[in-house]
Image (tube, rainbow, N blue to C red):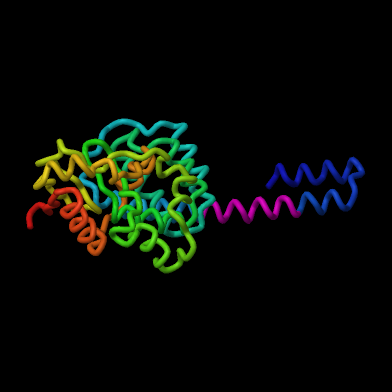
Amino acid sequence: MALYSTFIKSIETSGGSIELIELAHRSYSRESLEGIVRQGIREKVGHYLLEELHQINNEEVIDRAIDNDWLTLFWDTVEKKSSEDIQRIYAKILAGECLRPGSFSPRLLHILSIMTQKDAMAFETICNMSIRDEGGTFLIEPLQEFENFLQKEITTHEGLGDYVIEDLESLGLLGRSSMVAFHEEEDGTQKDIGGVTCTVVVTNSELLTKNQHYITGIPFTMPAEELRSIIRLTQNKPYFYALKNFTAEYLGIELKPNGV
């Protein structure tokens, strides 16, 4: 405030115009209001952070400082986010970084800085239909055989409307190259499908060898995998059973949920 008063006096004593003085007043008022908003967001994220940390076993926390550059980037991006849902995502990320510094990349923070609430809703929707195994995380590319669940689930989600999967690719959460989703060497392996661990049982290896290259996946990028790790997954059961029936009929694979 003292610096601002000195600045105004210097304009006045140097014969500055009324317009310049009024401009300085407006600039100061705007920056003050924006500062209040940014501080409010920081404190809300701090509150959500405490909620997350209360759920963490203190014995698991690694005694290593968070990188200063990472922390500066974190606060620079979070203070511009008015969506409570995205603020909570930031709080989960910071809690995870407190637990294990280096768990979340600066690239993820950059993606979050341009992510909208619609992006977040769409990403959570596809995570509930995502598949994770030793090779990474991916989505089955939309197939007419099981009613194109991916795009259908996104567009019928309240508030998403005309959102398309390609928007997540543009954001940097989905890769551009396809991958083989199921192959003949997977008998007995584990796959996490929407948060539920399943065992892959090959019942017809000849059928799988014949059709495996027709069933491709869209890979998650590394930032997307980091983001998926903090989402509370709720498996999309209609999608899972459609996928289960499809793989049994066309690939000769049975997906058996563990513990069932």
Along the line of sight, the residue nearer the viewer: 199 or 117: 199
Q: Quadrant of residue 134?
A: top left
Q: Quadrant of residue 16?
A: top right
Residue 107 against residue 88 in the figure, above or below: above
Give left or right: position of 191 versus 4: left
Farthest residue toward the right? 15
Looking at the picture, how far across and down is residue 53, in whole percent?
Answer: 29, 49
Looking at the picture, how far across and down is residue 86, in whole percent?
Answer: 43, 54
Q: How many marks?
A: 0
- Point out the stretch of residues depicted in magenta: 26-40
Residue 32 lies in the magenta stretch: yes
Give left or right: position of 143 versus 243: right
Looking at the picture, how far across and down is residue 234, in whole percent?
Answer: 25, 59
**What quarter of the picture does the C terminus occupy?**
bottom left
Residue 202 against residue 64 in the figure, above or below: below
Which is the main secondary structure of the residues drawn in magenta?
helix
| Residue at the spot 35% in from the left edge and 44% down from the top edge | 218
| Residue at the spot 26% in from the left edge and 34% down from the top edge | 62
Along the line of sight, the residue nearer the viewer: 210 or 119: 210
Looking at the picture, how far across and down is residue 204, in whole percent?
Answer: 11, 46
Along the line of sight, the residue nearer the viewer: 169 or 249: 249
Give left or right: position of 113 versus 46: right
Q: Quadrant of residue 223?
A: top left
Residue 66 lies in the magenta stretch: no
| Residue at the spot 25% in from the left edge and 44% down from the top edge | 132
